Amino acid sequence: MLKGKAVKLGDNISTDDITPGRLFHLRSNLHELAKHVLEDVAPSFGSKVKPGDFIAAGVNFGLGSSREHAAVVLKMTGVEAILAKSVARIFFRNAINVGLPVLICDTDKINDGDELEIDLVGSIVKNLANGTEFPIGEFPEVMLRILKEGGLIPYIKKHGDFES
Amino acid sequence: MGKTLAEKILSENSGSDAHAGDIVIARVDLAFLQDGTGPLALRQLEESGLEQIANPERVVIFLDHAAPSPSPELANDHIILRQFARKSGAQLYDVGEGVCHQVVVESYANPGEVIIGADSHTVTAGALGAFATGMGSTDVAIAIALGKTWLRVPESFKVEIGGRFTKGVYAKDLALHLIGSLGADGATYKSLEFSGEAISNMSMAERFTLANMAVEAGAKTGLFPTDEVTRTYLESRGRSALFRALRPDPDAEYERAITIDASSLEPTVSKPHAVDNIALARELTGIKIAQVFIGTCTNGRLDDLAVAAAILSGKRRHPKTRLLVAPASPEVLREAIATGYIQTLLEAGAVLLPPGCGPCVGVHQGVLGGGEACLSTANRNFRGRMGNPEASIYLGSPATAAASAIAGEITDPRELM
């Protein structure tokens, strides 16, 4: 059971929004890159987000470039999980690969600052601020296994391969 | 039950009877990294402890996004990538040696292969009948080591393009129209499978343009059946032995069918700040353009430079409009010199950039100023994409780009043809 506050974001947040191209030179300096997370589209995000928070976004979260740095810097903010109405496929894999859960659910009734409780076993998100509940969409079993190990690198270190 | 192209290729490469929705472990025939995603992939590879590389001949490193390097940090990233290539035996394309996706189709991609690249526009090679898809650094790192990856077999959309393009209308206009009608997430996770008269009549260059933009509708891959055009292209690249006839079964199941009449299309433009925010070029007349950029993995090929040169021949760029041209590969550059296109473009006032990604990703070679608008032949116009969140990007065909460079504002190219 996870518990934390929601930080609300809109629709179509691209990986360019999360980690802009003009900061390309910081990609091997993730600590510095993370200071600029989402600064063009949500300038207050970086100062507002606290470890244990959840992102509650709209449709097509993480569209665009394959840059995994976007998932990495969101994870570095301490965000526990990303809730979105839908997610772009490369970002989805990247987030799981770095051990950041992406949960597909209806985020319309989640407001900025709402206290959420997430039951990963029961696949339910509860909004404690208004008493609403939403089911979490299913995702492939292989992704669950990777997530359980904390990401693809720890998974491969333990199992050596995809099959085991 | 018959199979789609995606089901056929993934069945073969995974040695299983794969259907949409299945998870397969597929053999990876080509894996590649570029300078924006490569350094993180190498750190992950080292962290994984996997020491062997499955097939160094089929691992390629490209220095194309920030090349030649504009900063010490990126120069250091380039050093790391070069060292890895030397040590591992992976193939290296250094600065000025082309955009990854163009080099992949020129020298590596073949029908029926599974290709993964740490770049979203890896889908370009789908035009050759390869299941090509973009992934992040960690996925590609593991594929480099193991020679395989896991894939969910996608559901497919049948995209049938009938009729013929009218004068001044190109594959780029079709791609923008298609994305506009599907929406930026309209094909998320899906395989777009192209067919129809207009598709059969397309050159390889046009097919690459259309396949390249499949990801802008969220698609996992954009697949073309192979035909004589594919065979001729592979022959010209010295890979005739690798041609294979590939088409979907007649009774394949599609999640959705989309039909577009190519003859109904007009020059199309994506407006800021989303690719699916489309309009007709003629509806945008009067919008001033500070910079025109012709190039990228979408439209930096010889045919694209030919179209631009034909329109710009004997003319000059508007005095208030900069014109940047980046051929997608050294081969494109050499051929564009031999055919005189480069001379024509230079006489029209173009600035020639080295083969590579140019200003597309906002890292160098044409970062926009505040309040400026760019008409680009690239595939993405997100806010800040070209390095400045206060600038605007419009996307169009090389013809629309050339016409707009002359007029200094967005212009329907048919007015100048």
Image: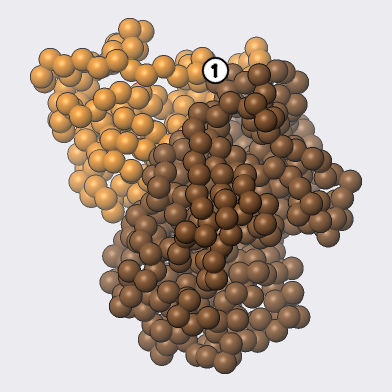
Describe the element under mark 1 as helix, strand or loop: helix
In the figure, B128 relative to B53: above or below? below
At which x and y percent is residue B362? 44, 62
Taking the spot 74% from the left edge, 28% from the top edge, the residue there is B13
Q: Which quadrant of the structure image shows residue B382?
A: bottom left
Q: Is residue B394 left or right of residue B107?
A: left
Taking the spot 66% from the left edge, 48% from the top edge, the residue there is B127
Give the position of the N terminus of chain B as an image quadrant.
top right
- Report which colour depicts chain A: orange
- Report which colour depicts chain B: brown
Q: How is the image coloured?
A: by chain
Q: Which quadrant of the structure image shows residue B184?
A: top left
Q: Is residue B388 left or right of residue B208?
A: left
At which x and y percent is residue A22? 41, 60
In the figure, B107 relative to B332: above or below? above
B107 or A148, nearer to the observer = B107
Q: Residues within 10 Å of mark 1 (few under 14, many from 20)?
A: some
The answer to whether residue A110 of the structure is visible from this angle is yes
Which kind of residue does numbered mark 1 sit on? Val
Q: Which residue is denoted by mark 1 in the rendering?
A: A142
